[in-house]
């Protein structure tokens, strides 16, 4: 990995990047920036969402700006207004120390006269959506006949949204002597056609394999009956306390319906779709970025431009119609080197789509079993315990109650107090899930048979011990010599995890973890309630309550760190 200082950028830009806290470029930045600076050729850059593509074109674009020329020199096209606003904001941040550069964002849903006035006041860079950009060009308020650079960002998404005609007209109107830089997560035929028709011998930069999913994202699916779709969603959310997620729906009506049901059920939820005004959308996004909203329900189009690095989960409430859209959705998580999880809710008739998506992203999507009521209750109760351990207490605030607290301590043991507190604090969720039915649909494929031939195992280590799904898989392989065909369904929670293992391998897994510890704490395994197996527990966990209490006492001093931190065709035009 090189440093930004080695890429050939102006000192003022290096100072701007340093001010933002960046020292090392991402892979696409490392490949694209020197290529642009050292060559006059056009460029096609293929990289996943969240890999730093804005910096990959924004920094060399600013480097090439003639500060003495106040006319428009560069145009950046993006699929949505949210993304256009974010790109303009990033360019201004990069150019903080580069005096004399002015950037204007233009997009629909906002007063065009204000944008015209901004253009008339002079700028060198214009960022905007194809529709509004073309409107301004036709009004002759935006002149692109003499620009030096034209950037197509998220080119595949713009074409999916039906902007082909607008893009063609803009490309035909723009200066013939310009450089064209095309950035895309996937390379469908329509994108390749643009490169062929409007670019001159472009250099191609590819990070990973074309159309491949990001390696920082784990892909999972749940096979369900369609009537259980919402109940499955709730169960997944409840089994992941602390979830920070985007739920993708295919239509505006479905988005509104799911968001309203989640809000009615008490979740911190907001909806994002095309029927909302720009002000409403900005308000929802502000709440989501500040985590006042932790679950965002969105259409594919409305979600473009979401720039949040620590989203833990992407949930596909319905699979998208276009396979490439799955890649864009999943790219909302696992950003900036962090890990994330992409979860698809799949009805029986959608299984063929799953196979096609796997071929597109060149990655296996692993089936997981919908969490049982017992698993959800464990997750929620353990989260209550963690919250109790980490609570910040101010002695002065409790001073008026000191006498009552001491009286209570004489009537009950600490263990009894904790048990009653947790029971009261979790009563609603425990009552809701105590008789929860199995939501998993039956399947006849080989991968479904594999799920039936496996056992589900509980292990008392999780995020608090520094594990995520990738590092826990590494530990399982290291300790047991298992292969990927022997285990799966790895589900890491805050203080514990679950995984599936072939029935024939269960005995060996328990033996492998006998006497094993993480830090000062013994690692314990047990089979979930629905699993039938030898009546034994690893790690000396002979008494369920005793083992659980000891593990929490030890974990209080743990030093583990938390590691995890639109499609619209011309025919449908959905948002």
Image (tube, rainbow, N blue to C red):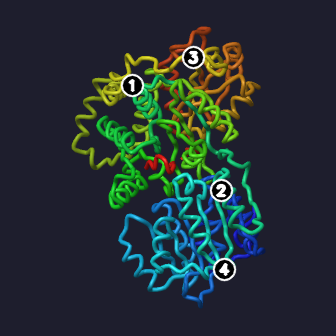
N-term mark: 2 or 3? 2
N-term mark: 4 or 1? 4
Task: Return the x and y of residue 554 as percentages of the image width and height.
Answer: 53, 33
The residue under label 2 is 191
Q: CA distance from mark 2 to mark 1?
A: 63 Å
Task: Return the x and y of residue 533 as percentages of the image width and height.
Answer: 60, 9
Position above or below: 266 against 524 = below
Q: CA distance from mark 4 to mark 1?
A: 67 Å
Front residue (pair 208, 572): 572
Residue 155 seen in the figure? yes
The residue under label 4 is 64
Depth-wise, is mark 4 or mark 3 nearer the camera? 4
The quarter of the rendered structure image containing the N terminus is: bottom right
Depth-wise, is mark 2 or mark 1 nearer the camera? 2
N-term mark: 1 or 3? 1
* Residue contact at pointers 1 and 3, CB within 8 angstroms: no
Q: Can you tell which quarter of the image residue 260 is in?
A: top left
Q: CA distance from mark 4 to mark 3?
A: 62 Å
For label 4, the SS is loop
> Is 332 positioned to the left or the right of 518 in the image?
left
* Residue contact at pointers 4 and 1, CB within 8 angstroms: no
* Residue contact at pointers 2 and 1, CB within 8 angstroms: no
**Residue drawn at point x = 33 percent, y = 61 percent:** 279
* Residue contact at pointers 4 and 2, CB within 8 angstroms: no
Crowding at label 1, few (<14), some or many (≥20) Cα neighbours within 10 Å? few
Task: Return the x and y of residue 299 as percentages of the image width and height.
Answer: 44, 47
Crowding at label 3, few (<14), some or many (≥20) Cα neighbours within 10 Å? many
Q: Can you tell which quarter of the image residue 113 is in?
A: bottom left
Front residue (pair 518, 380): 380
Q: Which mark is residue 527?
A: 3
């Amino acid at each position: 990995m090189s440093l930004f200082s080695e890429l050939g950028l102006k000192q003022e830009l290096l100072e701007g990047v340093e001010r933002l806290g960046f020292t090392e470029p991402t892979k696409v930045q490392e490949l694209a920036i020197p290529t642009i600076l050292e060559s006059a050729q056009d460029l096609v850059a293929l990289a996943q969402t969240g890999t730093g593509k804005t910096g990959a074109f924004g920094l060399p674009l600013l480097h090439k700006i003639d500060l003495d020329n106040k006319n428009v020199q560069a145009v950046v096209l993006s699929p949505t207004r949210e993304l256009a606003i974010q790109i303009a904001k990033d360019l201004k941040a990069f150019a903080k120390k580069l005096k004399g550069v002015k950037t204007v964002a233009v997009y629909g849903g906002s007063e065009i006269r204000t944008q015209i006035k901004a253009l008339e006041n002079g700028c060198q860079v214009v960022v905007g959506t194809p529709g509004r950009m073309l409107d301004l060009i036709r009004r002759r308020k935006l002149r692109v006949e003499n620009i030096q650079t034209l950037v197509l960002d998220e080119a595949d998404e713009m074409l999916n949204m039906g902007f082909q005609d607008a893009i063609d007209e803009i490309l035909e109107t723009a200066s013939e002597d310009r450089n064209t830089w095309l950035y895309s997560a996937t390379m469908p035929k329509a994108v390749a056609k643009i490169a062929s028709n409007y670019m001159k011998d472009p250099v191609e930069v590819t990070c990973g394999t074309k159309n491949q999913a990001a390696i920082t994202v784990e892909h999972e699916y749940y096979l369900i009956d369609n009537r259980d779709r919402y109940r499955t969603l709730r169960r997944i959310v409840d089994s992941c306390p602390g979830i920070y997620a985007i739920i993708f729906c295919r239509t505006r009506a479905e988005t509104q319906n799911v968001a309203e049901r989640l809000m009615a059920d008490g979740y911190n939820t907001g909806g994002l779709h095309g029927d909302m005004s720009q002000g409403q959308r900005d308000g929802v996004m502000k709440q989501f970025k500040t985590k006042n909203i932790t679950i965002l329900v969105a259409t594919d189009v409305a979600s473009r431009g979401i720039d949040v690095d620590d989203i833990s989960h992407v949930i596909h409430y319905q699979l998208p119609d276009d396979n490439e859209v799955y890649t864009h959705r999943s790219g909302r998580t696992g950003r900036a080197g962090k890990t994330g999880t992409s979860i698809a809710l799949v009805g029986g008739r959608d299984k063929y789509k799953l196979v096609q998506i796997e071929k597109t992203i060149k990655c296996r999507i692993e089936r997981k079993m919908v969490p049982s009521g017992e698993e959800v209750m464990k997750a929620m109760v353990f989260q209550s315990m963690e919250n109790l351990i980490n609570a910040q207490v101010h002695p002065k605030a409790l001073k008026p109650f000191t006498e009552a607290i001491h009286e209570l301590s004489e009537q009950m043991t600490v263990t009894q107090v904790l048990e009653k507190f947790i029971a009261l604090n979790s009563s609603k969720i425990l009552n809701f899930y105590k008789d929860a039915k199995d939501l998993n649909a039956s399947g006849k494929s080989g991968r479904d048979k594999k799920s039936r031939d496996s056992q589900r195992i509980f292990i008392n280590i999780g995020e608090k011990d520094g594990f995520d799904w990738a590092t826990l898989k590494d530990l399982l392989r290291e300790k047991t010599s298992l292969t990927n065909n022997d285990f799966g369904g790895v589900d890491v929670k805050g203080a514990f995890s679950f995984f599936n293992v072939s029935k024939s391998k269960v005995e060996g897994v328990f033996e492998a973890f006998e006497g094993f510890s993480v830090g000062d704490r013994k690692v314990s395994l047990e089979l979930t309630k629905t699993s039938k197996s030898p009546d034994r527990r690893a790690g000396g966990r002979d008494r369920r309550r005793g083992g659980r209490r000891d593990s929490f006492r030890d974990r209080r001093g743990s030093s583990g760190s938390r590691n995890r931190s639109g499609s619209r065709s011309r025919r449908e035009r959905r948002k």
